[in-house]
Image (spheres, rainbow, N blue to C red):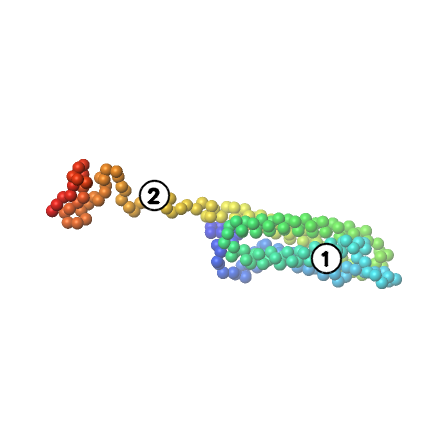
């Protein structure tokens, strides 16, 4: 788009919340933010159970503390990361430097791809530990819905973050094409000849200098009367 750089117009424009929340990458960030809350909340609230004859609670995922810690840590970190990128999206149109916009978009692509991979690992890890969990460790089947919710939304998060990386790459490609206005800059003083020179050209022989009759009938034709004449008196 003309006048755009990496998916946003020139710096200084007014912020439009309606347009902002209609953008695909904004919607995906909000979904990823919501999914991280579900994953974190499900494990924190109902992710630890115990047998009737035990007082200590263990992780619902096969009593593997690492599984619960992974879900809690990644859910919290993804929550903060979504907020950070939402703030960057709000500030992005105010960035005047094309190079800084490029860095922000590349960071979006890389971080989103990283989170997509980490949620894939988390989904596989939690699913495996839930499948091998022993029924005698949780005879009342407590927290089953929370465990399944964490696994389900970890699966959804793979695609929301992957889509953010894709849209970030599209913004990068758009910026590489539309930011030419900052790369093809031409100094007006160097391009004056193309637009036409408003001044009379000068030649060594003085033939084009002072032509015309600016005062009465007199004209300047040369020096000492040689070549061009001299001063004509009237």
Q: Where residue 32 sits: x, y (%)?
A: 65, 56
Q: Earlier in the sequence, mark 1 or mark 2?
A: 1
The residue depicted at 58 percent of the width and 58 percent of the height is 87
What residue is disc 1 on? 72
Residue 27 shows in the view = no
Residue, x 59% and y 58% (percent of image)? 86
Q: Is residue 44 left or right of residue 31?
A: right
Going by the picture, which residue comes out furthest to the top?
A: 227
Q: Residue at x 48, y 58 (%)?
A: 12
Q: Residues within 10 Å of mark 1 (few under 14, many from 20)?
A: many
> Which residue, given by chain and number where applicable, does mark 2 sit on?
193
User: Farthest residue in the left direction?
Assistant: 234
Q: Residue furthest right?
A: 53
Q: Quadrant of residue 149?
A: bottom right
Q: CB of mark 1 within 8 Å of CB of mark 2?
A: no
Q: How many marks?
A: 2
Q: Label 2: how many residues lie within 10 Å, few (<14), some (14-19) or many (20+)?
A: few
């Amino acid at each position: 788009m003309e006048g755009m750089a990496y998916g946003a117009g020139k710096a200084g424009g007014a912020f439009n919340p309606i347009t902002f929340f209609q953008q695909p990458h904004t919607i995906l960030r909000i979904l990823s933010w919501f999914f991280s809350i579900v994953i974190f909340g499900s494990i924190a609230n109902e992710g630890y159970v115990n047998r009737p004859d035990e007082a200590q609670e263990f992780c619902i995922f096969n009593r593997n503390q690492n599984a619960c810690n992974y879900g809690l840590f990644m859910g919290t970190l993804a929550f903060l990361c979504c907020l950070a990128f939402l703030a960057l999206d709000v500030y992005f149109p105010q960035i005047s430097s094309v190079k800084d916009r490029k860095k922000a978009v590349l960071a979006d692509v890389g971080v989103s791809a990283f989170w997509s991979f980490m949620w894939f690992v988390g989904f596989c890890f939690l699913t495996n530990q839930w499948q091998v969990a022993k029924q005698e460790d949780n005879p009342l089947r407590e927290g089953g819905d929370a465990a399944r919710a964490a696994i389900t939304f970890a699966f959804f998060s793979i695609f929301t973050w992957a889509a953010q990386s894709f849209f970030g790459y599209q913004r990068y490609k758009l910026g590489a094409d539309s930011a030419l206005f900052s790369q093809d800059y031409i100094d007006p003083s160097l391009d004056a000849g193309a637009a036409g020179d408003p001044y009379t050209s000068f030649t060594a022989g003085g033939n084009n200098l002072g032509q015309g009759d600016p005062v009465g009938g007199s004209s300047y034709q040369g020096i000492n009367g040689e070549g061009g004449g001299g001063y004509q008196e009237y």
